[in-house]
Every structure is written in structure tokens, then in C-alpha cells.
Amino acid sequence: FQRWKTHPAIRETLEGGKRISYGARAVNKGGLNSLPKLTFPGGMMVGCEAGFLNPAKIKGNHTAMKTGML
């Protein structure tokens, strides 16, 4: 991830940004109704953080990666 963040195309996008929070969270169970609110003023949650990945069943990799591409 560190190498990815220093890629010239990505570095430009991230330059000047600041981390507002960090931490770990549990995987959501319960389908779409259990997902958190994905957007907030000035940002949005994508990938695993948004709950689009179920690592126990190795399901949702494609949706987690696709949201990261948006």
C-alpha cells in the first residue's frame, strides 16, 4: 500500500490530503440493510471499509475493488 501511495498518478491525488480518522472495524453481516452510510460531507467510504468485502467467505472482492476505482 505504501508503494501504491507513492506512485506518481496516485501521489498527485493524495497530495495535500489529511487523515481524519483511522482504525479497524468488524465485517458487516446482514446484507444491504446493515451497511453504513457511505457518503458524508467531503467524502465517501469505499472498498472494505464500506462493508463490501466478506473475508471469511472471500466474497465481494470485486465490489470492494470496484468501489475503490470510483
Image (tube, helix red, strand yellow):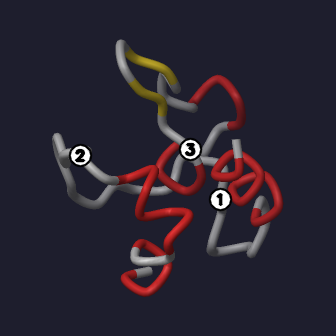
Residue 39 pos. (x, y %): 49, 20
Q: Earlier in the sequence, mark 2 or mark 1?
A: 2
Question: Given this view, does label 2 or label 1 mark the residue nearer the observer?
Answer: 2
Q: Which of the image's four quarters has the N terminus?
A: bottom left
Judge by depth and name the residue closer to the eye, 2 or 12: 12
Q: Which amino acid does label 2 sit on?
A: Gly
Q: Residue at x 65, y 63 (%)?
A: 54
Circle 3 residue: 46
Residue 55 shown left or right of residue 37 in the figure:
right
**SS type, badge 1:** loop
Q: Which residue is drawn at 65% across and 38% down?
A: 30
**SS type, badge 3:** loop
Q: Residue at x 19, y 46 (%)?
A: 18
Circle 1 residue: 53
- Cα–Cα span, label 2 and label 1: 29 Å
The image quarter containing residue 23 is bottom left
- Cα–Cα span, label 3 and label 1: 10 Å
- Cα–Cα span, label 3 and label 2: 20 Å
Q: Does 48 appear above or below 18?
A: below
Question: In the rendered structure, are the residues bearing label 3 and label 1 in contact, judged by CB atoms less than 8 Å apart?
Answer: no
Q: Earlier in the sequence, mark 3 or mark 2?
A: 2
Circle 2 residue: 16
Question: In the rendered structure, are the residues bearing label 2 and label 1 in contact, judged by CB atoms less than 8 Å apart?
Answer: no
**SS type, badge 2:** loop
Q: Which residue is drawn at 36% across and 19% down?
A: 42
Q: Which amino acid does label 1 sit on?
A: Leu
Q: What residue type is labelled 3?
A: Val
Judge by depth and name the residue closer to the eye, 60 or 33: 60
